[in-house]
Amino acid sequence: KQEVTQIPAALSVPEGENLVLNCSFTDSAIYNLQWFRQDPGKGLTSLLLIQSSQREQTSGRLNASLDKSSGRSTLYIAASQPGDSATYLCAVVQTGANNLFFGTGTRLTVIP
Amino acid sequence: NAGVTQTPKFRILKIGQSMTLQCTQDMNHNYMYWYRQDPGMGLKLIYYSVGAGITDKGEVPNGYNVSRSTTEDFPLRLELAAPSQTSVYFCASSYREDGYTFGSGTRLTVV
């Protein structure tokens, strides 16, 4: 069964700092990987989707990378802002499955 | 474009009661899903559907039922509510395996 792990569970950084969130998965037979943002009491907002054939995706200050062979993905956030404070979730779609396997998330706090 | 709409947003049930969580999407997505999120845990799949008339169990289906009579709607039915079903429920839709869109969630408490 696919297991998705996110480290660290919580992270606190000063405003303006660049940071990296980590995601690892146990089964490399994935169709794609998706990063989501979740604000307290809210739903999930899709940030970036990386297909299994891709190495990275970029959107504004966000860059996500995928190394399928090692079972790792990173989400890089440049010049962090207080508005980036949220929980970031990583999820993978297993090849041949109709399911997103989620990690437990990294709770990010950006201090003004 | 409303995306995925869930109702209600909050609900308190007594043990043994039943209810239906509603989910509607207007993106003509063929795939729809129900997840639950418990504190400190990742989202777990309850049921999913790959099209009208087709549903299948996910990781944690016990105590729930679903139906998919139209492309747009995918209601989740709780029969005989139990405290273990206290959770936040999310509905999602996608075009095949790509680009999941989530609703804003239903926070359910069973007392």
Image: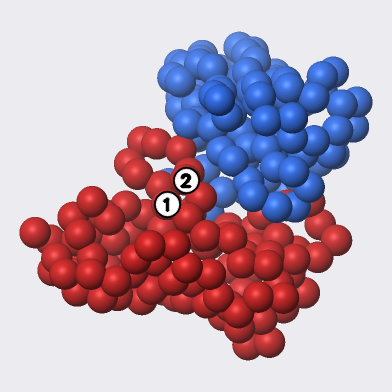
Chain colours: A red, B blue
Question: Which amino acid type corresponds to the residue marked 2 in the rendered image?
Answer: Thr
Q: Compared to A7, does B63 lie above or below?
A: above
At a point 35% along the width and 44% down the height, the residue shown is A39
Of the two numbered discs 1 and 2 on the same chain, state the one appearing first in sequence: 1
Say whether residue A8 is visible. no
SS for callout 1: strand
Name the subunit of mark 1.
Answer: A
Residue B45 versus residue B20 in the image, above or below: below
When asked about the image quadrant of residue B56, the answer is top right
* Outermost front residue: A60
Image marks 1 and 2: residues in contact by CB distance under 8 Å: yes
Name the spot of residue B15 as percent of width and height, x first.
55, 17
**Observer-nearest of A97 and B38:** A97
Name the residue beneath numbered marker 2.
Answer: A45
Most foreground residue, B52 or B35: B52
Seen in the picture, residue B54 relative to A51 is either above or below; the reply is above
Give x and y (percent) for residue A76. Answer: 38, 73
Crowding near pointer 2: few (<14 within 10 Å), some, many (20+)? some
Mark on residue A37? 1
Residue at the spot 62% in from the left edge and 13% down from the top edge = B19
Q: Residue at x 23, y 69 (%)?
A: A79
Report the chain holding disc 2.
A
Choose between A86 and A7: the one closer to the eye: A86
Q: Residue at x 63, y 46 (%)?
A: B100
What's the amino acid at mark 1?
Arg
Confirm whether residue A45 shows in the render.
Answer: yes
Task: Answer with left or right where residue B64 lies relative to residue A36.
Answer: right
> Which type of secondary structure does the marked residue at label 2 adopt?
strand
Q: Residue B34, position in %: x, y?
A: 66, 36
**Percent position of residue B9, x then y:** 46, 20
